[in-house]
Image (cartoon, rainbow, N blue to C red):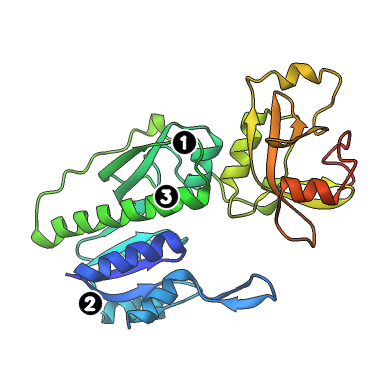
Amino acid sequence: MNILFAGTPNIAAKSLERVAESFRIVGVLTAPDSVGGRGRKVLPPPVKVIALRLGLTLLQPDRLDEEVIQRIVSLNPDILVVVAYGKIFRDNFLRIFPLGGINLHPSLLPKFRGPSPIPAVILAGERETGVTIQKIAKKVDSGDIIEQIKIKLAGDETTLSLTDKLSDIGADLLVRVLLKYERGEKIDYIAQNEGEATYCKLIKKEDGKIDWRESALYIDRMVRAYNPWPRAYTFLNGKTLVIHSGFPLLDSGEASIFPDSVAGEIVRIDKKRGILVKTGEGVYCITELQLQYKKLVNWKSFANGYPGLVGTILGGLE
C-alpha cells in the first residue's frame, strides 16, 4: 500500500516517523519553509526535517495546482494520510487516491473541529479529550469517524505537554487504522452528530492578552493553553510581561482578604507561593514570568529585581 503523507507541525512529525516504520510512503506533502524565530531565519517545517532524514520524496507547494497533482499521480499513491496539513483538498485532488483519505484530528470529534483543538480543549476546561481518525470529507473535520481514543485530563496540561501526549497516542492509532486498510479489513464508518459539533479558531498573537477581569481559573487556562505560543501576556509599566506559569487561588480566602483591590492589582508577594494578582474572581499566583527584553525568571528573582511591586496594576500603558 502506497501512502502520500500530508502534514506540517510537530504533531504530524511524530505520525510520519511511526507510519514510515511500517508502511511505504511514496511522498510527503508539507508547507513551504517559513521565516520565524529570533533573527528571522528561514525555518523548515518539522515534517520536512523528518522526511529528509528518512530520505522520502518531499513536496512543498504553495498551492495544490495541476502541476502538483500530476506529480503526485506519478507517485502512484493508494491512500492519503493527513495530520495537521493546513490546506483544504478539492475533489480533483482526492480522486487521486483509490482508498480515499484519512485524517488524524487531536480532539473527540465532533467537538472542537478546526485548526486549534488542543488549546481550545484547555481553554474550555474539558475533563477529557483524545484523538480521532476520520475519513476526509468536503467539510473540514466532518468526515465519518473510523477510530477514536479518549483520555482523562488532570487539569494541569499545557498545549505543549498535551500535544506531545496526543502525538504518541495518535501515531499509534494511525498505524492501527492503516493496517486495516492494508489488510482489506472491514471498516465501520460512524457518521458524526452535527448537533454536537463545536468549533475552534486559528489562534492569533493578541489572543494571549490577559484580561484580569476574568476569573483566576480562566486565566490559568489561558497560561496553559497558550504555552508554547503565543504565550499569555500582560503589561507592566508599558512593557510586555509574559506569564509562563502559575496557578489559581480560588478557595484559600485571598479574594476576600483584598476586597478593595482592583482586577490586575498585585496584592502580595507571597514568600511560599509567588506573586499574587487580584482577578475578577479569585487570585492568580504567578510563579514564572518574563519582562520584555529580559530572561525568563522565577517569581523570587523577579520580585527581588523589581521592588515595590505590591499595589502595581498589571495591564495598563500597553
Q: Nearer the viewer, mark 2 or mark 1?
A: 1
Q: CA distance from mark 1 to mark 3?
A: 12 Å
In the foreground, 117 or 74: 117
Q: Residue at x 76, y 33 (%)?
A: 277
Query: Left or right: 51 with respect to 20?
Result: right
Task: Determine whether label 1 and label 3 are within 8 Å by CB.
Answer: no
Give residue 38's position: percent from left, percent from top: 68, 72
Residue behind mark 2 = 76
In the foreground, 118 or 260: 260
Q: CA distance from mark 2 to mark 1?
A: 36 Å
The reply to whether residue 317 is in sight is yes
Give residue 120's position: percent from left, percent from top: 52, 41
Badge 2 or badge 1: first in the primary sequence:
2
Is 244 located above or below residue 264 in the figure?
Answer: below
Q: How many marks?
A: 3
**Mark 1 burial class by Cα count in 10 Å: few <14, some 14-19, many 20+:** few
Badge 2 or badge 3: first in the primary sequence:
2
Residue behind mark 3 = 140
Q: Residue at x 80, y 34 (%)?
A: 264
Residue 80 — which label? Answer: none
Q: Secondary structure at mark 3?
A: loop
Residue behind mark 1 = 198
Give residue 199's position: percent from left, percent from top: 49, 40
Q: Amino acid at mark 1?
A: Thr
Q: Nearer the viewer, mark 1 or mark 3?
A: 1
**Mark 3 burial class by Cα count in 10 Å: few <14, some 14-19, many 20+:** few
Q: Amino acid at mark 3?
A: Val
Task: Determine whether label 2 and label 1 are within 8 Å by CB.
Answer: no
**Mark 2 burial class by Cα count in 10 Å: few <14, some 14-19, many 20+:** some
Q: Secondary structure at mark 2?
A: loop
* Quarter the N terminus occupies: bottom left
